[in-house]
Structure formats: structure tokens, C-alpha cells
Image: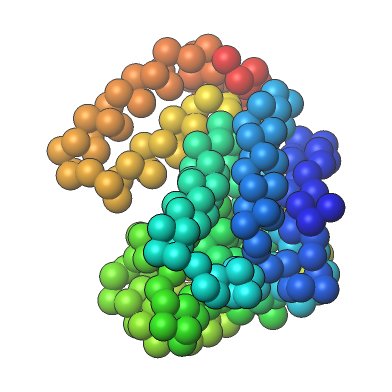
Amino acid sequence: MAVELKKEGDFAVLTLNRPEALNALSFLILDDIARALDEVAGMKDIRALLVTGAGDKAFCAGADIKELRGRTLIDQKRGAELGQSVFAKLDNLPVASVALVNGYAFGGGSELALACTFRLASPRAIFGLPEIKLGLIPGYGGTQRLPRLVGEGRALEIIMTGRNVKADEAERIGLVNAIAEGDLMEAGRDFAGKFTRYSLPVLECARRAVQRAGDVTLDEGLRIEADLSTLAFRTADAEEGMAAFEEKRKAEFKDG
């Protein structure tokens, strides 16, 4: 299967499994990713999603360019909207996602990583949005998500030159959260474990509040924060957390 989904302990693991094609995206694979993410959304016993690519060369080398030739404008627009809608499913998951970028992440591959909540990179990871070299621009969310991470000026420079961004630079500019030496999957579990021990409903409130920050004015964002912080306060986990603090013991969150 080109897209594999399995459960490993507290985590769901989604793997793009086309190493012979550098895990490139086709429209059929986008459909498969969408179905896998819908399945993840329905899982009741996971605490995070890990996303990676099979093999040791690529996370995802981007779109299958052969599919783009000869398409009508309507087909092209629908294709962009498909990619955007699939990757938007990552925003709407009840759990956070971590992209484990183990090699090339070009075009749609970078956009998939950008759509995840967090990104870890191996030292050999290379990011890029090279669409400009083909007379195109990113169409699966890259022009919107990259500036939210690295700032408008740097995002424009990366997109308008189509240059590669190696792992060390990606970490320095905030494109990735960390570079992981050794086993990337194990590093992903360790990274996710730093937040998944907390209350899942409260984690979701925090994620929603931060995600909205780039979309609204400060005043509206503060109202959203007030609403979500109130929702968090009403959870049983909030009561447990505050009681544990006063009693000088470790909180036992139950996701309620």
C-alpha cells in the first residue's frame, strides 16, 4: 500500500510507502491520505499522530509532475483544493501530529510537513518549495503556512528562489522544532511524549487557540483564548491538575 496507517502504543503512525518514487504524491495517494486521516480522527485510544516516509532518501518528494501536464484550469484548481483540503484534516484532528522528515521534503512534501503540528528532522533532511522553477507556485498550503512559521520575508525568499533549506537552517529559522540524531521514529515518540502525558482535551484547547492566532486580530484572538481557557477550566482534568499542585503530587489526568 502506498499509504500505511498503523497503531503503535499511544501513537498512530502514517507512512508514505513509495520509496522507489521518493514517496511522491499522486492524486490517488492524496485520497488515501485523506481516508487515513479520517480513520485517525476516529481513533479513541491514541495520543498523537506520527507522519513519515518509507526508505532512507525521502519524506516526500512532492507532486507527481506527470499528472500535472495537460490539465485544464478547472482541473488544476480542483487539484489544489484537494491537496489543501487533505492537509487541512491535520489541523482538525483531535490530537497533535508530528512530521518525521527523514530526507527530501520538496513541494507537496514540504507542505505536508508544514501542515503537521510539529516537525522533527534528521540531519540529512532537506526542505524546498521549488515550484517556481516549473513556472508554478505552491498550491497545497505552502504560501500560507510557511510565513506563519518563518515570517513573510524569509518565506518569500524561499518560495521565490525555490532554493533548498537544509536541516540546520530549518531548525535555526523555526521551520523544524528540532534535529534528531539516531532513530527518527524513536525521537518522534520521545518528542510527542513530552506533551501527550497531559490532558488531551486541554491540549486540544491550547492547539486551537494558537492556531487561530495567525488568522484573527489580537482582540479577537484574546476572546478566543478566553473562551478556550474557560472550556479547559471546566474539565475534570483541570480540577485534578490544580488539586495535584496544591497537594504536591503528580497529576493523574484522565482526558475528561
Image height of 101 relative to 167, above or below: above
Compared across the picture, whether 157 is left or right of 113 comes to: left
Image coordinates for residue 129, horizontal then vertical, percent: 49, 76
- Decide which of 12, 85 is in the foreground and name it: 85
Q: Going 30% across and 23% down the picture, which residue do you hit?
A: 227
Instruction: Confirm whether residue 240 shows in the render.
Output: no
Image label count: 0
Q: Picture quarter containing residue 29?
A: bottom right
Image coordinates for residue 62, horizontal then vertical, percent: 60, 70
Q: Going 49% across and 27% down the picture, which residue do you hit?
A: 202
Q: Picture quarter containing residue 240?
A: top right
Image height of 125 relative to 83, above or below: below
Q: Picture quarter containing residue 209?
A: top left
Way the structure is coloured: rainbow
Image coordinates for residue 30, horizontal then vertical, percent: 63, 53
- Decide which of 224, 246 is in the foreground and name it: 224
Q: Going 62% across and 43% down the picture, which residue do you hit?
A: 34
- Decide which of 26, 179 is in the foreground and name it: 26
Compared across the picture, whether 112 is left or right of 7 comes to: left
Q: Going 64% across and 47% down the picture, which residue do you hit?
A: 31
Image coordinates for residue 149, horizontal then vertical, percent: 40, 62
Q: Quadrant of the C terminus?
A: top right
Instruction: Confirm whether residue 94 shows in the render.
Output: yes
Image height of 77 relative to 211, above or below: below
Compared across the picture, whether 146 is left or right of 90 comes to: left
